[in-house]
Image (cartoon, coloured by chain):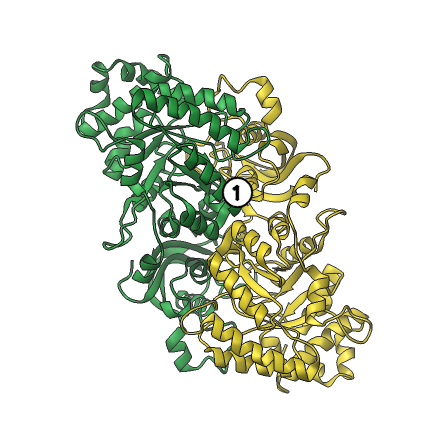
Chain colours: A yellow, B green
Amino acid sequence: MADDDRIRCTYWLETGDDPARAAEVIAGEQSSGTFVALANETAELKARSGARVDRLEVLGHAAQPSLPTPAHAPGRTGRYTQCTLSLSWPLANLGPSLPNLLATVAGNLFELRQVTGLRITGLELPEAFARRYPGPAFGIEGTRRLAGVPAFDGQRGGPLIGTIIKPSVGLTPDETAREVRQLVAAGIDFIKDDELQADGPGCPFDERVRAVMREVRAGEERLSRKVMVAFNLTGELGEMKRRHDLVLAEGGSCVMASLNSIGLVGLLELRRHSQLPIHAHRNGWGALTRHPALGWDYAPWQQLWRLAGADHLHVNGLANKFSESDESVIAAARSVLAPLRPSHPMRAMPVFSSGQTGKVAAATYAAVGTADLIFASGGGIFGHPGGLAAGVTALRQAWHAALAGIPIERHAQSHRELHEALAFW
Amino acid sequence: MADDDRIRCTYWLETGDDPARAAEVIAGEQSSGTFVALANETAELKARSGARVDRLEVLGHAAQPSLPTPAHAPGRTGRYTQCTLSLSWPLANLGPSLPNLLATVAGNLFELRQVTGLRITGLELPEAFARRYPGPAFGIEGTRRLAGVPAFDGQRGGPLIGTIIKPSVGLTPDETAREVRQLVAAGIDFIKDDELQADGPGCPFDERVRAVMREVRAGEERLSRKVMVAFNLTGELGEMKRRHDLVLAEGGSCVMASLNSIGLVGLLELRRHSQLPIHAHRNGWGALTRHPALGWDYAPWQQLWRLAGADHLHVNGLANKFSESDESVIAAARSVLAPLRPSHPMRAMPVFSSGQTGKVAAATYAAVGTADLIFASGGGIFGHPGGLAAGVTALRQAWHAALAGIPIERHAQSHRELHEALAFW
């Protein structure tokens, strides 16, 4: 975060116009200027409230605009300049307000005529934001404590080995509970609802929670460890609060919400109410990030949700089934783990998922440098010929090998479940 | 809206894969399937919960993918098929829940490997959504009543002629009130805060409302008509409620919120609390719509916010200063005005802005077929050589000409303010 009272945002910008002029248009549009000169935009007002172009660095040129652009766009010349643009705003324009921050750094910019590409790549906020907002209530340490999974000590511990209830939607509460029973018996650390499963009449939230928690509590009696289940309580505010209270009353240890469905106000209110870690799902994120010349990088975006209180944040996974590159996944995971600022680290736990198997454990560990993460695998567990317990054990063995610096094939020679898993992963 | 109990969503899809296979992958991913075959995805479960491909129509082919796509994407052949895809889901998968609807129709789809372009172009919801959600509390009729602006009767009435306080940010409360005093005296119908102006320490919300409402009330005594001011109360939930209450206590008649900043939960709670029309700002929308192969059309998107309670919805304007085409603006405005369904029209008022002058009045009226709209103009008013009153009058004259079917140049011959305006518009 920035060390003074300015909000700083960095963009990848492409423009057919003169880049300095385009930068001034953006800075003006997002502060005291508009598309005509104003008598009352005095020099004093501009000095007090204007956005400032702090950096403008040309990266290169393209012959075609990255985003479709109308024929009357200014300076349209068949030569589009790509650059890094850093803007800053006085905190006094809006105060440390997350909802209002969006209108300033990510408001009416993307559609400007001068812009043939605009992507938010960095965000540095004044300390006032970290002082005002709560950040994760549980984070890495709280999650490990509630799930009973310590950091790796050479023998045990490591990431939370998790999975997602499948089919995503369609199971009844009892069918869901049966799957949970098997997973608990198999030694899993973490289970989550799919984001498609919330409170449909086919699988009502309350019934599902009661049925699942019976299995979790029964498992706890046997194992002295409570499997963490992230129940998807996404909904209206009253619903989310009531559902949270039920999960808490049933002895649950986690709730899940879809960030793009509830918005910042939803997460802020949930955080205020919650006594459990909040597992934050980013579904819909693809629309904001899939085109490299538009929208957001994850690093700036996830900051907003961590400040607002997300404990776990999805980051996709290496060699995933989606179109995201490993490089982007790694950057996302590192950003979730990086302290926001020394005085307010507000670190959250990255959640790896999507086609994950033990084969990517070593690369994941090498990339993020920690096992403070949730590693969710579906096929990587369910596909094991030895059954679910063997699948969970094999994943854990793969992670232990990675954490101990032992090549996975060598570790497999003395670990049967891992050996069998390597044949199908 | 759909007439049975299925949720229907239509997409523009581009894929390097076989389109039928890609459609099945999307349908599976967004319902009971996943990327591996599951033993418990039984035929019965699939029949109960699976998404259905209702329509798949090939539109054409492209040699390049619209969205960057990894080299290992399936079927990558240098031939990308573009099509219209309609999917439907049983309402029972999620129930009539707006937040959960997003995960289903707009969740983890955009980043699928099979997808080189995906855009939501249509949405039809079962009646259960219209029964559950409130829709706009005031809409067109309530807004006209509060603003004292009737429909055009041949002499007076028409759209609400409005403007936006400029500079967007930087004015003190007193400076803002001075601008409002001049606008009220000039005969304006509607004034709004810029979305950048909320509750910064340089212009605190409470002070601004008190100072502005003094002018509005003074104007009301003189004119027997209260100018509608949309105060931007975007913020956390408690802040928004408190700010709403202040506006109400001061005699105000409108509040404004940025949809992408507060999210669905924020708007739903604001609607529940509000006794005033909600002016819904869409800033940030560009990131969701600027690339034609990604994100959303406005028609499906605005439905969500109308159901949740938006009374006014921004639609940009013809010949605007942004990159949006007139065609897109017209489609957006029509969608805001179209009844959701006969039993629950829930019509909202489209807000035209961005470089608007009287020169686009006739084309706007021709395109949307009504003057049930807010027409916000900045330079088109402030730039008038005869002053603000002449600027507002000229805009109204331009609209009256449009509504009466009189060419603007002819109308200008007998209307001085319009005549003068045509020279600078």
Q: From where the camera sits, is residue B108 visible? A: no
**Quadrant location of the C terminus of chain A?**
bottom right
Point 46% across, 19% down: residue: B178
Point 75% across, 83% down: residue: A415
Location of residue A157 with respect to A47 vertically, above or below? below
Quarter occupied by residue A218:
bottom right
Q: Is residue B353 left or right of residue B368?
A: right
Between A202 and A86, the one lying in front of the other is A202
For the image, the number of numbered tags is 1
Between A406 and B83, the one lying in front of the other is A406
Q: Amino acid at mark 1?
A: Glu
Point 66% across, 80% down: residue: A220
Quarter occupied by residue B186:
top left
Between A87 and A113, the one lying in front of the other is A87
The picture places residue A225, in percent across and down from the top left corner, at: 69, 77
Location of residue B91 with respect to B347 vertically, above or below? below
Q: Mark 1 Cα within 10 Å, few/some/many (few <14, many 20+)?
A: few
Residue at the limit of the structure toward the bottom, as seen here = A386
Location of residue A421 with respect to B274 vertically, above or below? below
The picture places residue B418, in percent across and down from the top left corner, at: 28, 18
Q: From where the camera sits, is residue B156 visible? A: yes
Location of residue B93 with respect to B255 vertically, above or below? below
The picture places residue A424, in percent across and down from the top left corner, at: 62, 80
Secondary element at tag 1: helix
